[in-house]
Image (cartoon, grey):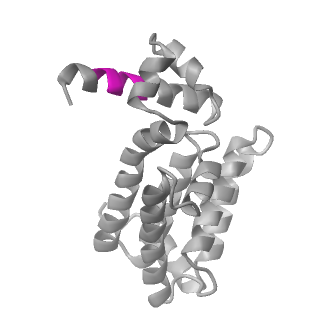
Amino acid sequence: MRADARKNRDHLLAVAGAAIAEQGVDVSLRDIARRADVGLATLLRHFPTREALLDALLRTSFDELTAQAAELERSSSPADALVSWLRDCVAWTTEYRGVTVLMAAAIEDPESALHASCVTLRAAGSRLLVRAQDAGTARSDIDGVDLFALIAALAWLGDQPALAPRAGHLSEVIMSAILTSAGNSQAEAERRPRAGS
C-alpha cells in the first residue's frame, strides 16, 4: 500500500474509532465519512462494508488481547492470569459501545469479517480458563463460551447509563464467582504487596 493511501486509511480508522466510541457501532458510515472530511465513496473504497471497517479497527485490539493472554500464561499464576485478562477484556469492550453484540453474532457466522478474530480471542480466554481449572483455581462448570458471554454481559452493564456506576463492582463479583475458594485466596495473596516492595 502506498504511503498516502496508508495515511488516508489510518485517518479513516482514527475518525471511525472516535465516532464509534461516542455513538456506538451503529454510527452511520456517512457520518464517519463526513467527520473524516471525505466522501462516502472514499470510505467505501477503503472499507466496503461496516464489518470490514470494524474488523480493521478492532483487529489490533483483538491481537493485543490474544497476545496478552499468551504472555499471562507464561508470567502469572492461573488465577491471576485469568482475572487480569478478564478485567482488560471487559475494559476494552466498553470503549466501543455495542461491540459485544457484533462479536457475539460474528462468532457464529463464519462469513463475518470479524469471525476469525473473535474465535481467536475466545480461544485465548478459553486457554486461560482451562489452565485455571486444571490448577483447581477456577470453577469447572463453565467453558470458553460461557466466559465470552460473561464478558459480553459485563460490557453491556457498562453501556447502560443507569447501571454503569455498578459495573466495576459487579465485574469483581462475577470474577470472584468464576474462581474457586483456592483461586480467590491465591489471587488475593498475589495482589497484596510483598514485604520490601
Camera-side residue: 40 or 74? 40
Residue 189 visible in image: no
Numbered disc total? 0
User: Residue 133: percent from the left, percent from the top?
Assistant: 50, 85
Res 181 seen here: yes
| Main SS class of the magenta portion in the image | helix
Position of 87 with respect to 60 (left or right) is right
Instruction: Name the residue rendered at 33%, 27% in the picture.
Output: 10
Residue 172 vs 187, above or below: the answer is above
Residue 156 highlighted magenta (yes or no): no
Give the residue drawn at x 59%, y 45%. Answer: 99
Q: How far from the left and from the top, in percent, is residue 137?
A: 51, 84
Percent of width and height locating residue 62:
41, 52
Q: Say which quadrant the N terminus sits in.
A: top left
189 in relation to 32, above or below? below
Q: Is residue 10 magenta?
A: yes
> Outermost residue toward the right?
162
Highlighted magenta segment, given as a residue range = 7-14
Please, is residue 10 above or below residue 185 in the view?
Answer: above
| Residue 14: quarter of image | top left
Q: Which residue appears at 75% of the width and 42% of the height?
A: 160
Of 139 and 18, nearer the camera is: 18
Q: Is residue 84 left or right of residue 4?
A: right
Give percent across and percent down for residue 37: 46, 10
Vertical comparison of 158 with 9: above or below? below
Q: Residue at x 44, y 12 (%)?
A: 38
